[in-house]
Image: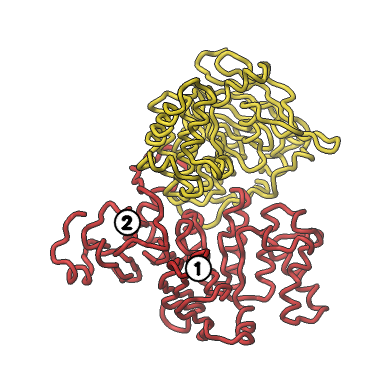
Amino acid sequence: MDDNYILEIKGLQTCFYQEDKVYYAVDDVSFGIRRGEILGIVGESGCGKSVTALSVLRLISGKGKIKKGAIEFDGCDLTQIREEEMRKMRGRKIAMIFQDPMISLSPVYTVGAQIQEAILAHNKIPSKEAWRKAVEMLEKVGIPSPESRAKEYPHQMSGGMRQRVMIAMALSMDPKLLIADEPTTALDVTIQAQILDLIMQIRKERQMSVMLITHDLGVIAETADRVVVMYAGKVVESADVRTLFKNPSHPYTLGLMNALPRLDRECERLYTIKGTVPSPADLPQGCRYAGRCPLCEERCLKEQPELVKVGEDHEAACFFSKKTAELRRKMAAGDIRDSSGI
Amino acid sequence: MSGGTALLEVKNLKKYYPVKSKLSRKLLGQVKAVDGISFSIQPGEVLGLVGESGCGKSTAGCTVLRLENATSGEVWFEGQEILSMDKRMLKDIRKNMQMVFQDSYSCMNPKMTIQEIIREPLVIYKMPRREQNEKIGRLLELVGLTREQGGRYPHELSGGQRQRAGIARALALEPKLIIADEPVSALDVSIQAQIINLMADLKKELGLGYLFIAHDLSVVKHISDRIAVMYLGKIVEQCEKKELYASPLHPYTVSLLNAVPIPDPEIKKERILLEGDLPSPIDPPSGCRFHPRCSGAKECCRISEPQLREVTPGHFAACHFAGGNVSETVSEAVSEPGEV
């Protein structure tokens, strides 16, 4: 394993069983997170980004199962270790924050007590010391008057404050990897800016790696170092953030970027990607984007494109990734308005 | 903007909710959700109403339609005052103003098919049965749904398709004004673009006016002609779209625009982080409601409340210091403004 990477996912396949049918939520996904970097995972709902994150922590239960693949974290394969060892990993080495802190936090305990509990679960220290640490963590994430705030219940706090509490809890164990699943989606833009700023500041201070899952390309552009774009359970493109935005090589990435209304640009009409994401129950045989792709040809309907190198630190899963540049120029000139073909 | 009657004119609209003690039912205070807002919409115009959650933008939309009873103020629709109207007249006028909601699933009866849902307003307004079917067919086509999809139940459609059905229902009575409350915020980017384009097309084809309520400034920028920014129940800035994004005058608008992430890593902007959260609307700050979070706040901002004034032609802002010139109320109230 490359020592630059804190986490490497290789050929991960996670599926869900329902009424004798198998749905592949994540299908043959591979990528890595380097030490100290923020890796953004972007995609629309149902693309498998959250299931990937949950697979890393082995939180897929019930009808779901990790079917294939390896998840190598700091030299050990998380899919192979025993449940007890996995429990020690969660929280201590890999922490996770979620979209809605109100669901993650217990409504009947004060936030201080919940952070204290997390600390005590992993350390044998007196509870008073754990409480002190909890207050200290709250202060670190920018909660004013942390002593009195620690005695409050989640409902007494605003959405932004609750997310700060979640971050404080996640950081209390000093994890090496923080997985943030849509951490700012439920927040207003001004509060979102505060939380993203906090995550970036913490990363800098602690040299922590962050896996930032979001659907917002704006958030990605402003915070991530590298980006993985997912579509219908597959990685379709990965690159460092500047390359991705300058030279998107998968038609889906390009379509997504052009479908966004922008503050910094004028455009008469938004580009539209026709149709909808294919259902996981009914995935096409060939490229999963073929039905919506303006570059689609015979071959795309039959074969699944592999992720191939298209440039320095840049991979795309498209047979015609070279043609995407031409498509981009045409879109920029306003010649193409939707994905119905050139 | 002058000449002819406005499609919708809202004057000093207020909506207060009482906060009562759970035990004694004693009045503890009031949530001033909407606190004296005024705006107008011309036929075929799109007014974007933006603000963060809790600023009162949705309440404003509901109160305009009389889905909520206003505390005071006036709402004029094509020269007729709505808030004082009796029920029969209101029913007549309501078919001209329809609403599209954020969550298309919760605003549809799960036991009805899409066709039946679209048919309901036609039945209420007594359209002959024969014409109804034809009308429904045309509406489905207009919003880009097939006949077959019209026969399905809401849960059988995707979010985008359901929102299209919601728009078809709103259009059934051929309204002149659509109040759209966060119509695209629950949708994915690729679907969001489809719905925004659909709404823009319908505006052009049918000459609709929109009150477009949203929190996403990029979306509002794309679709609106004019924009009003709300903060804690008040409009703090209002002007033409281009003007607002090119030269915002209110410090809140400036920080709101700054907080929107730009999908371009080459642009490294100077972040203006707004501190703290939205204050409680039960007990809003004295003077200017934005002063505790404003970096340029002076003594006078704490004392006197700035009124919405025309700083440059057609550009209104409620800030004592907007546009470099101090408003008259301030120079009267405080002779020497000092730092807070």
Q: Colour of chain A?
A: yellow
Residue placed most toward the observer, A24 or B6: A24
Q: State the image coordinates of residue B222 (x, y, percent, origin top left).
A: 50, 58
The label shown at residue B24 is 1
Same chain, labels 1 and 2: yes
Q: Give the side of residue B146 with respect to residue B335, left or right.
A: right
Look at the image and tell me whether residue B159 can be seen. Answer: yes
Residue at the (38%, 62%) spot, across then down: B283
Q: State the image coordinates of residue B205 (x, y, percent, origin top left).
A: 61, 70
Q: State the image coordinates of residue A287 (x, y, percent, origin top left).
A: 72, 34
Residue placed most toward the observer, B7 or B250: B250
Marks counted in the figure total 2
Q: Give the side of residue B244 with respect to residue B48, left or right.
A: left
**Quick one: SS at disc 1?**
loop
Q: Chain of mark 1?
A: B
Residue at the (42%, 26%) spot, across then down: A129
Q: Amino acid at mark 2?
A: Pro
Residue placed most toward the observer, B209 or A121: A121
Q: Give the side of residue A271 with respect to residue A300, left or right.
A: left
Asked if A292 appears above or below B183 in the picture, the reply is: above
Q: Amino acid at mark 1?
A: Ser
Q: In the orientation shown, which residue stands out farthest toward the left?
A: B336
Residue identified by numbered label 2: B251
Q: Chain of mark 2?
A: B
Look at the image and tell me whether residue B197 can be seen. Answer: no
Q: State the image coordinates of residue A264 (x, y, percent, origin top left).
A: 43, 50
Q: Kindly report which numbered mark, 1 or 2, lies closer to the viewer in this rendering.
A: 1
